[in-house]
Amino acid sequence: MIVAALSPKSANYDAHRRDMAERRAQQSAAGRDIGPTPAIADPRRRKRCERNLALFARTYNPATFYWPWSPDLREVIETIEQSIFSGGMTAIALPRGGGKSSICRTAVLWAVSYGLVAYPFIIAANAEKASESLGALKIWMRTLEPYDVDFPEITRAARYVRGQANRAQGTLCNGQETFFRWEADRIVLPRVPPPPNGETDGPWARTSGIVIGTSGLTGEGIRGSLFAHPDGRSVRPDFVLLDDPQTDESARSVLQNAERLSLITGAVLGMAPPGKQMAAVMPLTVIQPGDMADKVLDRKENPLWRGIRRKLLTTMPTNMADWQEYFEVYNSGMGQTKQDIKPANRYYRTHRAQLDAGASASWRFRKGANEVSAIQHAMNLYCRLKPARFMAEFQNEPLVPDEAADLLTPLGVAAQFNRLPRGMVATKAQYVTGFIDVHDEILYWTVSAWEPDFTGGPVDYGVYPSQPVPYFVHSWVRRKLADVHPSAGKEGAIQAGLDVLVGQLLSREWMREDGAAMKVGRLLVDCAYDRDLVCAFCRRSPHSGIVMPTRGYPVPRGQEWSGHFLGKEGGQTGFHWRIPPPKGGGRYVLTDVNFWKSLAWERFRVAVGNPGAWSLFGDDPKAHAMLADHYCGERPVWVVAKGMGRWEWEVKEKRNDVHWWDCLVGTAAAAAMLGVMIPGVEVKRKRRKVSLAELMGGKR
């Protein structure tokens, strides 16, 4: 074997390359090394704030917290401290602009700075809002004085990255990797030695490896919150800040309120480590009666949240008529090209005793620089925002909405069209459902198509037998079942009509825009008119696997749909539908009609093209005139019972026909039976007890 010897020149070149590579590595490491942890500038100042959130906020963020604490904020601070030290959950509703978000964000900074929590998690109404909260913490870590010099184990690395996430990767401290992360939705504090004059439990600072995570409430980040450290440890959030987790839109939505409340009580609180109670703080604002915030703050309905609900004015003025004259002066001055509040101030000073009678402010320092008092400031807001918004956002006592302002109108419904041909299914739709409303002389029917998020609406509708006029009222039906089936008798004519109509609807293929052929997957038949007749028809139908009898079931006031059935044995409970245990008459479906009508009311007010919108086929509003009248024949009434509010539906006038309205909401309930659900909404189910013999036999 012959081995070629390296020439001196080649050997020298290889050595040179190795030497240069080593130098570059050393230079790179030196550039990434943040150096030893400096000493704490004022250990006594830092120590004084360790168990005192209010003192920490005033000491290290005086630019934000410069007013004397209001009694409400002091109560909030004490409750947050209790949650962090002892666990527990707190919901806080303070007047908008009262500093609740700032104090909660400061609470996160305080908790991580002293190592009081291992993994705080910030959840907001959406991912963008959550990033804003995390962004505020990042800025504070880099810029606050004297926080910078009192917490060097955090701020030295934070200032090193200069707001650039990629600079955090590979940072070193005395030559050892810090595992520091500075991402858009997460911070992992660096593993560094403690300050030389600071307290320590080992070679690393107490803050080393603390994770701060964020997510929008409806995002996937909540369920993917488990964090794995490089040393093999896995941690879950032990403190959650839910920063105003509802929006104006979600507060108006029956469905989104249910979704967000379900996520908070399920997925969010399920983030806690096994065997440990979650510490959670939720600053929020009540927007609508019965919205998610209103429900969480109700100590009877959600006692674990220890709801705190405070007002800008603890009591309103008793002489509201006298304030009307003040408002005229105020509006006149503020309506000028160059706004002038001086006339309003003069009027207020002159009549102050009369105007302030009966009123008291929760925080006397909350007023503008050009305003005389906190009461005047509050009433200026009342004037500018109008009573409904003021009572919601600043008093946390929203007025019961005037449903007349938001009622569907026939003209509005008929104009909610998607320009698809009659019978055509939208490309994204995955489910087709039908509903038949049974009467002794005529059958009303609707077939609807749905996307997985309940975007959709009717693709066709009609009556059997068909009528010779395009618009008619139920009491003036021209062609009746008895006319088409003259020798069958009354009940026989209904059954014969159902045979024909069900056969037509289930044999028909509904073409989707992309050419796919779809068929009705679930057809519900209303049995309110004659339960025995309809149940017998569905049971004997050759399509019994698809056709089921149904009737609306109003859950008792003050109870939730799924919770109402948890204690009932047998049957099947789904997303606002229920199949009771079969008895003599066979199986049938109960539907939560108030929920489905509220959903339809809500979805027809969503503009076509947006997720969740319901729309009609075609492009001619006149073609749906009769249908639109049916959809608008009922009104919602806000009902409160046992501390819970909900919309219930009643016919506006006795002569109104609402049969196609019933068909529409029935097709939505049928879609829920096929698995269509709002993303994130979970259904409570009672688990059947499994015996030891079944377990040993491998049965579930």
Image (cartoon, helix red, strand yellow):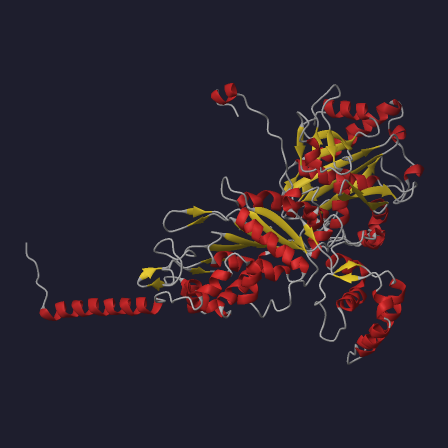
In this view, 528 is above or below 634: above
Viewer can see residue 108: yes
Q: Give 424 or 186, whichever is nearer the viewer.
A: 186
Residue found 89% across the figure and 45% down from its top: 652
Viewer can see residue 335: no
Q: Left or right? Give the position of 632 relative to 615.
A: right
Q: Left or right? Give the position of 33 relative to 639.
A: left
Residue found 66% across the figure and 42% down from its top: 303
In this view, 624 is above or below 182: above
Residue found 25% across the figure and 69% down from its top: 23
Q: Residue furthest left?
A: 1
Give the image location of residue 288, x and y in percent. 75, 52
Image quarter hosting the N terminus: bottom left
Give the image location of residue 22, x and y in percent. 24, 67
Q: Give 253 or 506, whichever is nearer the viewer.
A: 253
Give the image location of residue 154, x and y in percent. 44, 63
Q: Quadrant of residue 493?
A: top right
Give the image location of residue 235, x and y in percent. 45, 47
In this view, 39 is above or below 188: below
